[in-house]
Structures are given as C-alpha cells and as structure tokens.
Amino acid sequence: VSAVSAKYNTTRDRVLGVLTQGDAQIAFYDTPGLVNLKDSHTYVRSLAITASETMPSVDMSLLVVDAVKRLDDQALEALKNIAISSAKEAAPIMLVMNKMDLVGPTERPHVAKRVQVLSDMIEEAFTTYGPKEDDEFDEFDEVDNDEDDEDDDDDDDDYEEFDSDDFEDFEDDMSELELDPTKYLRDNCIKLSSFKDKDVAKLRKELLALAVDRPWMFHSRMKSDRSDLDLVTEIIREKLYRRFNQELPYQIEQENRGWTPFSDKSLRIDQDLWVPSDRHVKTLLGTKGDTLREIGTAARKDIEKLLGRKIHLYLNIRSRDPR
C-alpha cells in the first residue's frame, strides 16, 4: 500500500489499507512518521499534525516505534502530542516496538527503558486529557419541571410512543470498541520485526480479535483507497528510496506517461523520473545504465506480483536543468 524504506518521510500522506479476514475487517490509516531532515534533529511538526487529525476517525492508535533508535526530547514531545490527541478522542494506544531483530542482549535494557518512558507518557496523557466518566453529563443542568407537568400531559397526546426494540438495529450498528487504554503498554506492548516477518501474525491476530460488531466500511475485495496507478508509483518510489542515500530520493519527481494494456493481458507502464540537473541524471543512470536497470527490475517484479500480470516497465530520466 505504501512505500517502505529506511529514509525519512517515505510516507508523505495518510494512506488507507484494508484487511478483511473471515467475518472481520480492519481499516488501517498509515500516517507520516517523525522526520529528521539532514540529521539536523529538527523534526517536521506538520507530519505529526496529519497523525493527530486522523485520531477522531479511529478506534485505536498503533504507535510504532523503532526499538533500537534513541528518542530525543523533540521526538518525545511530538509523540506526547500524538498521545494527547489520542486521549482526547478516547482512542486507546497500542505500543508496538519494531525492528526487534536488531536488538541484542546489550540493547535489551535500553529497549525496556524506552517502553517504560513511552508507557508512562501515554498513561499520563490519558489520565490528564482522557474523558471522565461524568463528562457527558456536565453540559446538562438540573431543571425543575413541576410547573410544566400539566402542559406536558397535554403534549403527550401529540407524540406516538416508540418501542425500544425499534432502535435495536441502530444500536448494533453503533457498537464501539471498549478497551482499557493502558492494556497494550509496558509488558503487554507488542514486539515484532516487520522486516523478518516475526510476530507480525501475532499482531494481526490481536487486532482481529478486537473487531466489534458493526457493518463493514469497505467491500471485502478492497485493499486500499489508492488506484493501481498510485500503487505502482509507490512501488517505484520505494525502489528509488532504497537504492539512493542522502537527499537524491527527495528530489526525484515521478510523472506517469503511459498505461497501455495489450491483447495478451500484459501491461506497458511508462514513467518519467525528473531530476534537478544532468549531474543527477548520471547518478540515477549509473555505469552503463546499471543502476536504473536494477531499480526497474526490482520494481517490475513487485508490480507483477501486485497486478497479477506480465509488466513491461519503461523508466525514463529527464533533467529540469534548462542548459
């Protein structure tokens, strides 16, 4: 659904992914993570805003944290703001520690400390900003209705009495997830390695078990709100991010030029890769075009797997340098 790489800001916008298994369906909203530009330790706060704006539409937030990476004060402050937003919306947080395959015996105490710090921060957010049991009644004042009793009796004749059973179906549709917001913190946090696919099935099983009884939001065949063209673009972008370091991936602009199906059910895809200068063209091409060829081959294999058909992928590099 989304490009995945070690580069910052691989996910730029909120992306929907849908998992349907058996009689349960889960909608995932993948939001941009914290970004550190050019290792300056200045985080882009606007990306955290996207995550915060997603809170009102979810039942639970998965806070996925790099288990081996140090969290500085600015990162913790951004995570704290996300936790507060989640608490205000009464959306429990599941703490997920990723990249556990990189955690050796010497790193385990540091991971345990990170889990403790994050758990304390999340608990404090829910204690301070979470809804209180009697909050929903605060806006109502006591009213003395004795003077209006006689008028109310007359008005009763104007209204039809409804059976509570009439609203049974409506109430079923509005089922909400009832969960202790601290259930998946501390020792109960989820630890996994998405790269090694270790304990990912455990996370999936845990989430499916939390599904509540309500109508599905999406068709069972739907996997994302993105078109095939969008997904293909993401795959190519992922290969670019994985292949190049530093600033180059952020300067490459992709432009789709062709999507041509053939009678043998194969598909030709043409995409231009725009770079700032001729110097970047040489970098992207590599020796005798080897670098671009490797990127195209890796992308083509993933696209064929995605679309289930033979793909002819043509990537063309173009420079914006007027010279």
Image (cartoon, rainbow, N blue to C red):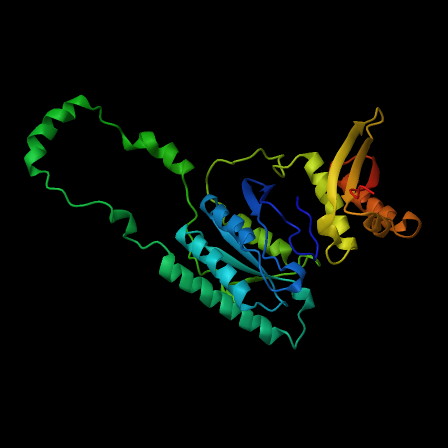
Count of numbered tags: 0
Between 228 and 157, the residue placed more toward the observer is 228
- Image location (x, y in percent) of residue 166: 32, 29
Quadrant for residue 108, please give it.
Answer: bottom right
Relative to 92, is 166 above or below? above
Quadrant for residue 125, please give it.
Answer: bottom left
- Image location (x, y in percent) of residue 138: 24, 49
In this image, 158 relative to 115: left or right? Answer: left
- The C terminus appears in which quarter of the rendering? top right
Relative to 131, is 122 above or below? below
Quadrant for residue 312, please give it.
Answer: top right
Q: Residue at x 55, y 44 (%)?
A: 26
Relative to 199, is 152 above or below? above
- The N terminus appears in which quarter of the rendering? top right
- Image location (x, y in percent) of residue 303: 77, 40
Q: Residue at x 84, y 24 (%)?
A: 263
Q: Residue at x 66, y 51 (%)?
A: 10
Between 211 and 267, the residue placed more toward the observer is 267
Q: Residue furthest top?
A: 158
Between 160 and 195, the residue placed more toward the observer is 195
Q: Residue at x 6, y 30 (%)?
A: 150
Q: Residue furthest bottom?
A: 106
Q: Residue furthest right?
A: 288
- Image location (x, y in percent) of residue 119: 48, 65
